[in-house]
Image (cartoon, grey):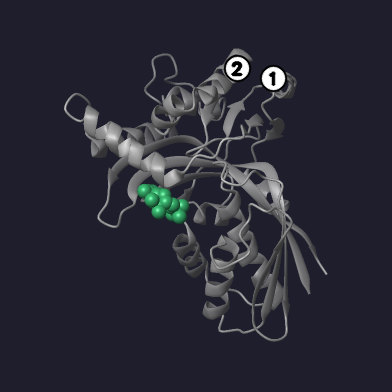
Amino acid sequence: MRITVRSFAKINLGLCIGPSRPDGFHELRTVYQTIALHDIIRVEVKRSAGIEIRCDDPGVPKDSSNTCWKIAERAMSALQTSGHVVIEIEKRLPVQGGLGGASGNAVAVLLALERALKKQLPGAEKLRIAAEVGSDVPLFLVGGTILGVGRGEEVYPLPDLQATPCVIATPEIGVSTPKAFADWDKLAASKELTTVHPSDRIKMFSRRISAWLSGASGVPGSRGRGRAETPLLDLVRTGIENDFEQVVFPEYPELREVKSVLERSGAVYSSLSGSGSAIYGLFSSPAAARKAAVKLSKSGIPAVLTTTMTRRQYWKKFLVSSA
Ligand code: C5P
């Protein structure tokens, strides 16, 4: 049986980088949001043994360094099954773009594999395996709006934000995530004596999210307004930001300009996603979003109109076919 699924992308609504940890990762807090842009993944299990990755995109590794390979290997062992796993990746998302493409692909493979084998792993076991493959893999086992803590791999479903028009700009710039973290460490060290300590910044971010969740963001004027009215606006008004902008924008000023174009075009909130280079803008109307996407495309920056996805939409659209 061949299982076909959609592997959706994510954006980060704010990302606060904390201190580096003894394991080499950084403590962080972020709000992940799944969006409708996606790759297509097909999984089939044949006789014999091994893993095979097929993909037309030359930028996608076909060996054991691929997240799909890593998760398939772990899932087959956890399911105590053998077989020849054939994974086909139809790449539509940019590789290395801050949109979690490779991470989403891994979860798509895990869930398609379960279906193909008609076997299931316990939910907690899936989260453990996903976290082993990468920090922003487990979020795709939840979908919708998600709080990420720890190194980003500890995920908690948040109340969904209603589907919101969104423009994703994907400048052709590859940002290395480990380098961006290293640059952040240098910047944080140079600021340490004058600004808030990294672990305190993390606490501030958490408090903002917690206050938002309890419906009182603490921003003058917003108190008393029900969160259900404008949850997204309330969230962005808490002042959450993506720390990576502070190190990525100085290195690639053209990315800051893309964010400015989105803001000038009426984005309610615009930010770098993850360590980039994707930049997104959230809009209150599809018409305004479309205009912004056209403006960016005309200036030579690839940009597409999409929408954020609630958890329910994410799961409803996940499976394409099982035949
Ligand atoms: O977990 P993932 O494979 O996505 O991480 C890629 C790299 O990014 C890690 O090897 C590490 O250098 C860096 N990273 C980090 N702190 C995190 C997540 C990733 O330093 N919370």
Q: Is residue 196 visible?
A: no
Q: Tell me if residue 211 comes above or below residue 284 in the rendering.
A: below
Circle 2 residue: 261
The residue at the point 31 percent across, 54 percent down is 24
**Do tag 1 and tag 2 residues touch (Cβ < 8 Å)?**
yes
Mark closest to the chain's N terminus, 1 or 2: 2
Q: Is mark 2 within 8 Å of ligand 1?
A: no
Quadrant (top left, top right, bottom left, bottom right) of the N terminus: bottom right
Q: Is residue 189 visible?
A: yes
Q: Is residue 249 left or right of residue 11?
A: left
Q: Tell me if residue 204 comes above or below residue 100 in the rendering.
A: above
Give, as a three-letter code, the residue at label 2. Answer: Val
Question: Label 1: few (<14), some or many (≥20) within 10 Å?
Answer: few
Image spot of residue 275 (x, y percent): 47, 38
Mark 1–mark 2 Cα distance, whole angstroms, equals 10 Å
Residue nearest the observer in this picture, 317 or 190 = 190
Image spot of residue 111 (x, y percent): 63, 65
Check disc 1 and report its element: helix, strand or loop. Answer: loop
Q: Residue furthest right?
A: 323
Give, as a three-letter code, the residue at label 1. Answer: Ser
Q: Which mark, by number, is residue 299?
A: 1
Check disc 2 and report its element: helix, strand or loop. Answer: helix
Q: Is mark 1 within 8 Å of ligand 1?
A: no
Q: Tell me if residue 186 comes above or below residue 286 in the rendering.
A: below
The residue at the point 57 percent across, 35 percent down is 173
Quadrant (top left, top right, bottom left, bottom right) of the C terminus: bottom right
Quadrant in the picture for residue 70: bottom right
Count of marks placed on residues = 2
Image spot of residue 133 (x, y percent): 48, 62
Image spot of residue 35 (x, y percent): 64, 41
